[in-house]
Image: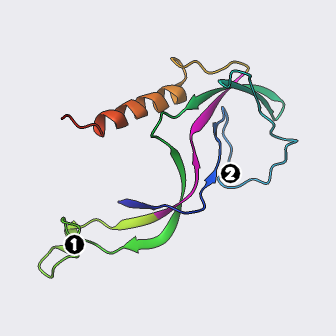
Protein backbone atom coordinates (compact mmCIF):
# COMPACT_ATOMS: atom_id res chain seq x y z
CA UNK A 1 0.00 0.00 0.00
CA UNK A 2 0.99 3.62 -0.46
CA UNK A 3 0.44 6.68 1.70
CA UNK A 4 0.89 10.16 0.20
CA UNK A 5 2.60 12.76 2.37
CA UNK A 6 1.44 16.22 1.36
CA UNK A 7 3.99 18.98 1.37
CA UNK A 8 3.53 22.65 2.25
CA UNK A 9 5.63 23.74 -0.75
CA UNK A 10 3.95 21.96 -3.66
CA UNK A 11 5.10 23.42 -6.97
CA UNK A 12 2.41 23.92 -9.64
CA UNK A 13 3.39 22.33 -12.95
CA UNK A 14 2.01 21.46 -16.39
CA UNK A 15 1.56 17.81 -17.36
CA UNK A 16 2.34 17.00 -21.01
CA UNK A 17 1.80 13.75 -22.92
CA UNK A 18 4.13 13.79 -25.95
CA UNK A 19 3.72 11.48 -28.97
CA UNK A 20 7.22 10.05 -28.66
CA UNK A 21 9.40 7.89 -26.45
CA UNK A 22 12.05 9.65 -24.39
CA UNK A 23 14.59 7.47 -22.62
CA UNK A 24 14.83 9.77 -19.59
CA UNK A 25 12.79 10.10 -16.43
CA UNK A 26 13.57 13.15 -14.32
CA UNK A 27 14.21 16.87 -14.44
CA UNK A 28 15.58 18.49 -17.59
CA UNK A 29 17.52 21.70 -17.72
CA UNK A 30 15.65 22.94 -20.81
CA UNK A 31 15.71 26.48 -22.05
CA UNK A 32 12.89 28.35 -23.77
CA UNK A 33 14.83 27.85 -26.98
CA UNK A 34 13.84 24.15 -26.99
CA UNK A 35 10.25 24.25 -25.65
CA UNK A 36 7.97 27.26 -26.14
CA UNK A 37 4.34 26.12 -26.45
CA UNK A 38 1.84 28.79 -27.44
CA UNK A 39 -1.73 28.56 -26.13
CA UNK A 40 -4.60 29.61 -28.39
CA UNK A 41 -6.86 32.52 -27.46
CA UNK A 42 -9.69 30.15 -26.46
CA UNK A 43 -7.36 28.31 -24.04
CA UNK A 44 -8.30 24.86 -25.37
CA UNK A 45 -5.33 24.11 -27.63
CA UNK A 46 -1.60 24.71 -27.94
CA UNK A 47 1.06 24.62 -30.64
CA UNK A 48 4.75 23.81 -30.14
CA UNK A 49 7.76 22.49 -31.99
CA UNK A 50 9.80 19.61 -30.57
CA UNK A 51 12.96 18.50 -32.36
CA UNK A 52 11.73 20.21 -35.53
CA UNK A 53 8.30 18.55 -35.54
CA UNK A 54 5.12 20.59 -35.22
CA UNK A 55 2.89 19.43 -32.38
CA UNK A 56 -0.72 20.40 -31.74
CA UNK A 57 -1.97 19.96 -28.20
CA UNK A 58 -5.39 19.53 -26.67
CA UNK A 59 -5.70 20.89 -23.14
CA UNK A 60 -7.73 18.59 -20.89
CA UNK A 61 -8.81 20.37 -17.71
CA UNK A 62 -9.38 18.23 -14.65
CA UNK A 63 -12.88 18.71 -13.20
CA UNK A 64 -13.59 20.72 -10.07
CA UNK A 65 -12.42 18.83 -7.01
CA UNK A 66 -9.72 16.85 -8.85
CA UNK A 67 -6.00 17.53 -9.17
CA UNK A 68 -3.00 15.61 -10.37
CA UNK A 69 0.04 15.00 -8.20
CA UNK A 70 3.67 14.30 -9.02
CA UNK A 71 4.98 12.01 -6.30
CA UNK A 72 8.42 10.76 -5.35
CA UNK A 73 9.27 7.53 -3.56
CA UNK A 74 10.74 7.78 -0.05
CA UNK A 75 12.36 5.24 2.26
CA UNK A 76 9.74 5.79 4.97
CA UNK A 77 7.56 2.81 5.93
CA UNK A 78 4.58 3.34 8.22
CA UNK A 79 4.25 0.96 11.16
CA UNK A 80 1.38 -1.55 10.77
CA UNK A 81 -1.93 -0.71 12.42
CA UNK A 82 -5.02 -2.75 13.19
CA UNK A 83 -8.23 -2.56 11.21
CA UNK A 84 -9.63 0.09 13.58
CA UNK A 85 -6.71 2.48 12.97
CA UNK A 86 -5.18 1.56 16.30
CA UNK A 87 -1.77 -0.01 16.86
CA UNK A 88 -1.70 -3.78 16.62
CA UNK A 89 -2.20 -5.82 19.77
CA UNK A 90 0.15 -8.67 20.54
CA UNK A 91 -2.51 -11.16 19.38
CA UNK A 92 -2.94 -9.60 15.88
CA UNK A 93 -1.33 -11.31 12.90
CA UNK A 94 1.41 -9.10 11.38
CA UNK A 95 1.75 -11.27 8.28
CA UNK A 96 -1.74 -10.31 7.05
CA UNK A 97 -1.06 -6.55 7.35
CA UNK A 98 0.44 -5.10 4.15
CA UNK A 99 3.46 -2.82 4.36
CA UNK A 100 2.64 0.87 3.79
CA UNK A 101 5.30 2.85 1.92
CA UNK A 102 5.22 6.65 1.98
CA UNK A 103 5.53 8.77 -1.17
CA UNK A 104 6.12 12.54 -1.08
CA UNK A 105 4.06 14.95 -3.19
CA UNK A 106 6.47 17.31 -4.97
CA UNK A 107 4.26 19.03 -7.58
CA UNK A 108 0.62 19.27 -8.65
CA UNK A 109 -1.35 20.10 -11.80
CA UNK A 110 -4.94 20.86 -12.76
CA UNK A 111 -4.73 20.28 -16.52
CA UNK A 112 -2.98 17.95 -18.95
CA UNK A 113 -1.86 18.84 -22.47
CA UNK A 114 -2.03 15.87 -24.86
CA UNK A 115 0.09 16.45 -27.97
CA UNK A 116 -0.28 15.02 -31.49
CA UNK A 117 1.89 15.23 -34.63
CA UNK A 118 0.57 17.94 -36.95
CA UNK A 119 -3.05 17.44 -35.75
CA UNK A 120 -4.79 18.05 -32.48
CA UNK A 121 -5.73 14.83 -30.65
CA UNK A 122 -9.42 13.98 -31.00
CA UNK A 123 -11.37 13.54 -27.75
CA UNK A 124 -13.10 10.42 -29.13
CA UNK A 125 -10.08 8.84 -30.85
CA UNK A 126 -7.04 9.66 -28.70
CA UNK A 127 -6.38 7.02 -26.05
CA UNK A 128 -4.89 9.47 -23.51
CA UNK A 129 -7.79 11.94 -23.68
CA UNK A 130 -10.28 9.06 -23.38
CA UNK A 131 -8.40 7.52 -20.44
CA UNK A 132 -8.44 10.77 -18.47
CA UNK A 133 -12.18 11.22 -19.02
CA UNK A 134 -12.98 7.56 -18.28
CA UNK A 135 -10.81 7.52 -15.15
CA UNK A 136 -12.57 10.61 -13.78
CA UNK A 137 -15.95 8.99 -14.48
CA UNK A 138 -14.86 5.79 -12.69
CA UNK A 139 -13.44 7.73 -9.72
CA UNK A 140 -16.69 9.72 -9.43
CA UNK A 141 -18.79 6.55 -9.48
CA UNK A 142 -16.62 4.78 -6.89
CA UNK A 143 -16.53 7.74 -4.51
CA UNK A 144 -20.21 8.72 -4.69
CA UNK A 145 -22.60 7.66 -1.98
CA UNK A 146 -26.32 7.17 -2.33
CA UNK A 147 -28.37 8.85 0.37
Indicate the secondary structure of the residue bearing disc 1. Answer: loop
Looking at the image, which is closer to me, 8 or 46?
8
Quarter of the image with the N terminus in it: bottom left
Residue that appears at 48% across and 25% down: 130
Magenta segment boundaries in residue numbering: 103-117
Going from N to C along the chain, the mark reached first, 2 or 1, is 2
Q: Is residue 57 magenta?
A: no
Q: Check disc 1: other Cα within 10 Å, few if <14, some if 14-19, many if 20+.
A: few
Number of marks in picture: 2
Residue that appears at 62% across and 21% down: 121
Indicate the secondary structure of the residue bearing disc 2. Answer: loop
Quarter of the image with the C terminus in it: top left
Q: Main secondary structure of the magenta part?
A: strand
Residue carrying label 2: 24
Looking at the image, which is closer to me, 42 or 35?
42
The quarter holding residue 140 reads top left
Residue carrying label 1: 86
Note whether 42 is above or below 135 in the view shown: above
Name the spot of residue 30 as percent of width and height, x first. Answer: 81, 49
Amino acid sequence: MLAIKKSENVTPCVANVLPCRIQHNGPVNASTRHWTPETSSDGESSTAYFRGRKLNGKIVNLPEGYRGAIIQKTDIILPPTGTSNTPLDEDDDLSSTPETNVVQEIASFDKITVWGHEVQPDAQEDVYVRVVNEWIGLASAMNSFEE
